[in-house]
Image (cartoon, rainbow, N blue to C red):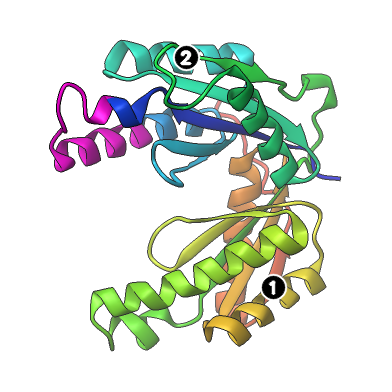
Amino acid sequence: MTNTQLSLIQIDNYGPWTVTPEPRREMDLQTLQSRLFADLAQFVGSRDGYVFFTRFDNMVAVTNGLDEADHELLQESIANRYPVTISLGTGVDASPVEALESATAGLQTAGSAQDGDRREVLSGDVLAESDRMPEDLQIAHFDVNDATGKYTDRLNEFDSFIQIEQGYATLMRYLREEYGALSFFVGGDNIISVCPDMDEADYRDAIAHVEREAGVELKVGVGTGRTAHVAGFAAKHALEVCREEGTDVEFDRPHVEVADD
């Protein structure tokens, strides 16, 4: 059974800040958001987690292996280097969407995202070390079949983007509604999904749905692991098998990392 720990990252009072004392330059805001995401990704990634940007003022992280002290350190680091602060809500559940619901509820109970008095909230539960298992996470890495040949080398960039995004939107909604999985676009033609226990038939079902509804053909590699990095790296290896063998769905075991002497 999966046991997913998710953290909701929310910039405090960001909307009002962007127009106080007057509206700020858009590219300055875009630069701040991109740098903040990069720093969050580096911090969480160095602890074998994943971060997804979603709407940038709200981000979702897979944080199995990060404890409360790690979350506090992250808040302190951001507050020391940015003109904004972040609040963090955590949740744990076999279902990724339920874990996110729990993480979200903690922040919503503490106050609105645009409440000027709400600062650096840290709420929710983390997965106890004694409860962690080698297969707590199932990560799926989806890839569009021949995206370069079908889109990049044939269409202008905006039309290519529309095709890829339609496939992503269809997959994102279907996996969330049918299985409680959370899917995130990560650039190019790649989508990473944080999933509950799903089998090959489930993934084939999702791929067939996207092809029917959006006309986009997908393949997927699936991995499991104790952390997002381990599960995700196994998924990448499985996806390479799809590319080499011409298959649509492949599962891979986690690749054991050997510590340096």
Marks 2, 1: nearer the viewer: 2
> Residue 163's quadrant in the figure?
bottom left
Residue at 46 percent across and 18 percent down: it is 74
Q: Is residue 69 above or below residue 18?
A: above
Q: Is residue 18 above or below residue 208?
A: above
Q: Position of residue 152 (x, y in %)?
A: 31, 80
* Lateral position of residue 55 relative to residue 154, left or right: right
Tag count in the figure?
2
Asked if the stretch drawn in magenta spans residue 64, the answer is no
Task: Give the CA distance from mark 2 to mark 1.
Answer: 40 Å
Residue at 48 percent across and 12 percent down: it is 73
* Lateral position of residue 29 relative to residue 15, left or right: left
**Helix, strand or loop for disc 1:** helix
Q: Position of residue 36 (x, y in %)?
A: 33, 31
Query: Which class describes the residues within 10 Å of circle 1: few (<14), some (14-19), or many (20+)?
Result: some
Q: Is residue 186 visible?
A: yes
Q: Is residue 67 visible?
A: no
Task: State the residue in front, 245 or 64.
Answer: 64
| Quadrant for the N terminus in the image | top right
On residue 206, the disc is: 1
According to the picture, the residue beneath numbered tag 2 turns out to be 118
| Quadrant for the C terminus in the image | top right
* Lateral position of residue 118 relative to residue 4, left or right: left
Magenta residues, start to end: 17-38
Task: State the residue in front, 68 or 33.
Answer: 33
